[in-house]
Image (tube, rainbow, N blue to C red):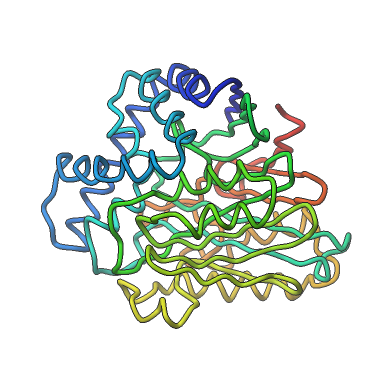
Amino acid sequence: MRILSFSGSPGEIGEAFGQRCRAEIPLLYAARLRNAVAQAKLHGGRDVGEDAVLKIARACMEPTRAYDPDGFAELEGIARGADLSLDKVLAMNGLTDLRDILAWGGDLESLGGCSSFMLAGDVTRSHKSLCGQTWDLATDNMPHVIAVHRRPAHGPQTWTLTTDGCLSLIGLNEAGIAVGTTNIRTTDARPGVTYLSMIHRALAAATLEDAALAISSAPRAGAHFYFVADAAGRGLALECTPTHVDATPVTSGAYVHTNHCLVPAHQAIESDTPSTSSHARQRRLEALIQADRGRADLDSAKRWLADRESEQLGISRGGFDGISSNGAVVMEPQSGTIHVCHGPPNEAAWIDLRAAV
């Protein structure tokens, strides 16, 4: 896994990031553009091209700038460093949300996934909370998965799993705030702030409350589930549509979320019938966690995320219908631990990201 480290102002970090990944960023943009256009045709029956994708990206610019000037400055820096237009950089960062705006309908089975969990201290051997997830996306994105360590001039250091030229996706900051996400789809998608910008801002927070507010207060473009945890062992599960947030404190036991809505009000506006894969992964991950209740640890969590009980429906996915587990993350916020892997967890090597920087 490539591990990049940047420091300075948001604009300086972005420009250095764009320069460092100048060769890779256009390739990732092209791959994500192909995905968005194909999904619009497959799931919405719409023949769209790059112009439609970039039109939506441009409509997201001002909401994003107003929501998080620092995060927007990093995006501008990435665009300068990579010599790529800002609308293309924003589209690359917000593919999932832009795709949902472009197209509705169809079977979710062929879309990206992710399987996430949050554990309170009563489930673990150390009595410390754990959280983590797989990150399932188009297999052709795999070469672009990287880890990024940011040391901003103002605000906490962060350690994240992301992709070339993109803001934070899954990560931990030095205050012990951990954030992750899984994708869901609802029919109220609209131009607004995309999910990576929200995670990036949440990871700039020093408290659980501020991190959660960064997500709940945003004019969100698309639907996502987010987990937020802190160094005090507290956890919060946020299932969000663009227009509604359901917040569930995780004070005991386990909370698992894959890619279908769990909140009844959100199920009523879910854009597709949830896939067989999402329900199967939800059940399997819950069962694996329950089997290790009271003795779970970092190694247990890695084993759960590597599970392939079914090739097609497994938690760790390898190239099924063009989708793979591009990586995975396990975090213990109370000790400031973040372990990551690049590729399907059943075959990838895990690294202690903070020790590796």
Residue 199 image position (x, y, % from top left): 53, 47
The N terminus - image quarter: top right
**Furthest residue toward front:** 66
| Residue 314 or residue 247, whichever sits in front | 247
> In the rendered view, would you say 44 is above or below 195?
below
Q: Is residue 183 left or right of residue 257?
A: left
Residue 285 image-quadrant placement: bottom right
Residue at the spot 43% in from the left edge and 22% down from the top edge: 18
| Residue 102 or residue 352, whichever sits in front | 102
Q: In this view, does 258 lie to the left or right of 7?
A: left
> In the rendered view, would you say 106 is above or below 60?
below
**Furthest residue toward right:** 126
Q: Is residue 143 visible?
A: no
Residue 200 image position (x, y, % from top left): 53, 42
Q: Can residue 212 be seen in this view?
A: yes
Residue at the spot 36% in from the left edge and 52% down from the top edge: 96
Residue at the spot 83% in from the left edge and 71% down from the top edge: 122
The count of marks equals 0
Q: Is residue 2 left or right of residue 261?
A: right
Residue 330 image position (x, y, % from top left): 68, 51
The C terminus - image quarter: top right
**Furthest residue toward left:** 47
Residue at the spot 48% in from the left edge and 37% down from the top edge: 167
| Residue 113 or residue 209, whichever sits in front | 209
> In the rendered view, would you say 92 is above or below 260?
above
| Residue 205 or residue 178, whichever sits in front | 205
Residue 35 image position (x, y, % from top left): 28, 47
> In the rendered view, would you say 148 is above or below 134?
above
